[in-house]
Image: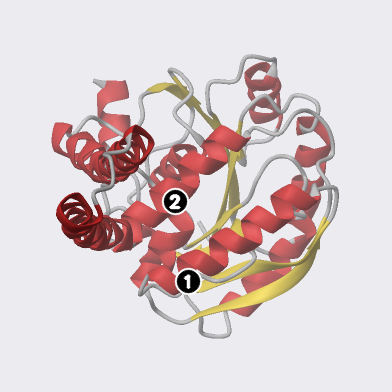
Amino acid sequence: MDLSIVIPIYNEQVNLPALNARVRAVLDALPLQTELIYVNDGSHDDSLALIRAMAAEDPRIHFINFSRNFGHQIAITAGLDLSAGATVVVMDGDLQDPPELIPELYAKLKEGYEVVYAKRRTRQGESMVKLFTAKVFYRLLARITSVNIPLDTGDFRIVSRKVVNALKQMPEQNKFIRGQISWIGYRQTFLEFDRSERAGGVPGYTYSKLIKLALDGITSFSDLPLRLATIGGFVVSGAAFVVMLYAIYAHFFLRNPEGWPSLMVSILFLGGVQLMAVGVIGEYIARLGANARQRPLYIIDETDVPVSAENEASPALRALRR
């Protein structure tokens, strides 16, 4: 198998026919042995039925159906785990990632790279709030981590089998694929493209999911929040000590009456700082607990992905066929 294409799907019945037609047109034009893997991430619409019909029509098309919704990053992970291609393309199913860019990504990879990611030159159809928060997040992440995560990129990229095998050795539960690929290293480059607006349907990434993804990225590749909590504790303790000295001085020399407002402000301030520190520590502990439980990342309800030398060791496939 020369090329695998992995597409996570969540409630994309509106976009699937056009998506499948465009991807198949690209595959038809490529002189390669290819496969297309749709990962149905617990869709509530008719996405799975459409995918089954597509798989029955074209032997290059396969599907993975989860037992429930496990999340976008986990769906990508499952597709990578079960793919058989010497190279693998990851893209979204909302047609914001143009399938027509795949031949250029493949050609660029063959120049001697292990990763070629698609960098967004423009982003159409997105609000100013989302554009601003995304810009701030990626630049903040670049500053607080030692990993060079490319700016203005998503998960749309092509990787070699060497990178896929390296990803399989990273079993953490809170996945941040683009950060993990950057952490792996090897020769990486990019191609710029203009990202279109969503073709139809409702975005799967709500603001709450985007916040969770941002937390996963920060906690997976930086311990700066813990350092800030520690530094904040020292700063607040120092300030409290200064206030204590002033209170003693005021009591004996200024004869000022003790004030209830200042007391309440001090208590609330100290309590707020403590809760923030506990919350930061709790985020890291929760992730440690999730990894310590060693639950499977995902559970497959059914799949028609054939067993190959690349995926025969997959725990999900072994459990499904047991």
Q: Residue 85: where, in percent of width, then height?
A: 48, 56
Measure the alpha-carbon separation of dots 1 and 2. 32 Å
- Disc 2, SS: loop
Task: Residue at 66%, 70% (x, y): give it.
Answer: 105
**Vertically, is 305 above or below 221?**
above
Label drawn at residue 84:
2
Q: Quadrant of residue 67?
A: top left
Kind of residue at badge 1: Ala
**What is the image's colouring?**
secondary structure
Residue bearing the label numbered 1: 142
Task: Residue at 75%, 29% (x, y): give it.
Answer: 202
Kind of residue at badge 2: Ala
Label drawn at residue 158:
none
Q: Residue 301: where, in percent of width, then height?
A: 42, 18
Q: Does residue 222 appear to the left or right of 48 in the view shown?
A: left
Q: Nearer the viewer, residue 169 or 194?
A: 194
- Disc 1, SS: helix
| Number of numbered discs | 2
Can the viewer see residue 37? yes
